[in-house]
Amino acid sequence: MPGVYISYPFCAQKCTYCNFASGVLPRQLEVQYLAALHHEIRATQWQWTPETLYFGGGTPSNMEPSALASLIGAIPGNPTESTLEAAPGNITLHRATAWHQAGINRVSLGVQSFITHELTRTGRKHTAQIVEQEIANLRAAGITNFNIDLIAGLSGQTPASWSESLHWIERLNAPHVSVYMLEIDEDSRLGSEALSLGQRYGARDIPTDDAIADFYESAVERLARLGIARYEISNFARPGFESRHNLKYWLREPYLGFGSDAHSFDGADRIQNTELAQDYVIDPAPQRTPADPVAERFFLGLRLSRGIEPPFTPFEAEIEKHLASGLLQQTGTRLHLSPRGVLLSNEVFSEFV
Ligand code: SF4
């Protein structure tokens, strides 16, 4: 069954590493945006009842709980998994209880690090102790399924500080963890500062690529020892806690996106709404492009640890090449990335586009 994604691009601050179409936007725009979301949802002819619902952004946890409940009420049925992305800092028991009552049963926490000086450089204001208290609030409210996002490669990160962040995962008994490697590009303030060899935002203290790869690999090993296995390049879960919603993206199942920069897939075409909230409130202006089912089966399916089953046409030559280079491996009939291939996945995926 398909999923629903709702984008909420409003944030309390613009984090230095963030390259999403989100940020600090006027309050009046938020009001218009909520109205536009309701309008887009109401205009939908539902051919199915959603199995999953995912609020991303942005910081949808900053939305008034009543506004969140009203959006959930506009979606047909009762999704099995309803996730809310949340920024630590204001998750009171009262707020978490309101989310749970509205139907949220999974929270994805943008923690990024448990080390205060690393967080300060990103623009975040929470601490490890705040995260600990807020996870207790979620659990007390009945939300026991949660994800913790971590970033490998933050400015000032060291093997010892990374190890401490991983230690917190163990301490908090997280059922799901996402580990992203820092992306350096022109679309974030930190990225563009690093590319221009500046020093703002701690750009000079970004760990080297090799150090970031080591952090990532140490996370893979340590999480595996905790029973939190990698099931996708950046995603790790205890058995049964894999994100049902996000699995749809890699398994090419349909989903419907609402809001600015939201993407949809109807099984044949990929559709993308206009990127900026200020344009979206005037017109979502969806752009439709045909999907490429053959190539997508490879570069999306190979993101998953389980990999893909044959047939491997029309890419037999490319696959032979990377079986020989050691970036791909076969287990039984299934084809998947090797541990080194996970780190160099873009090199492999570029063969399929
Ligand atoms: S990282 Fe998250 S909270 Fe920070 S600006 Fe980007 S979307 Fe907002």
Image (cartoon, helix red, strand yellow):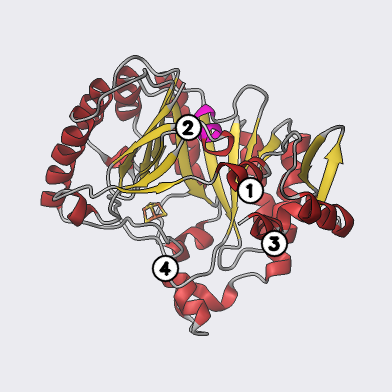
Is there a contact, CB below 8 Å, between mark 4 and mark 3?
no
Instruction: Specify whether tag 4 is near ligand 1 (CB below 8 Å).
Output: no
Q: Is residue 4 magenta?
A: no
- Residue visible at 84% across and 45% down in the picture: 329
Query: Residue at the location (29% across, 20% down)?
Result: 102
What secondary structure is marked by label 1?
Answer: helix
Residue that carries the numbered disc 1 in the rendered image: 299
> In the displayed image of the protein, which residue is found farthest to the bottom?
197
Which badge, 4 or 3, comes first in the chain's sequence? 4
Per the model, the C-alpha gap separating discs 4 and 3 is: 22 Å
- Mark 4 element type: loop
Q: Nearer the viewer, residue 281 or 289?
A: 289
Location of residue 18 in the rendering, given as x and y in whole percent from the top left corner: 43, 60
Can you tell me which quadrant of the image ligand 1 is in?
A: bottom left
Magenta span: predominant SS is helix
User: Are dots 2 and 1 in contact, CB under 8 Å?
Assistant: no
Q: Secondary structure at mark 2?
A: helix
Disc nearer the start of the sequence (3/1) = 1
Nearest the eye: 143 or 41: 41
Q: Which residue is mark 2?
A: 135
Measured in 3D between alpha carbons, the distance from the residue under mark 2 to the one under mark 1, in whole angstroms, is 35 Å
In space, the residues marked 1 and 4 are separated at their CA atoms by 24 Å
Q: Is mark 2 within 8 Å of ligand 1?
A: no
Residues packed near mark 2 inside 10 Å, few (<14), some (14 to 19) or many (20 plus): many
Q: Mark 1: is the Cβ under 8 angstroms from ligand 1?
A: no
Q: Which mark is residue 187?
A: 4
Mark 3 and mark 1: span between their CA atoms? 11 Å
Q: Position of residue 82 (x, y in %)?
A: 41, 25
Disc 4 from disc 2: Cα separation: 31 Å
Q: Check whether the beta carbons of the residues at disc 3 and disc 1 lie within 8 A of each other.
A: no
The residue at which mark 3 appears reads as 347
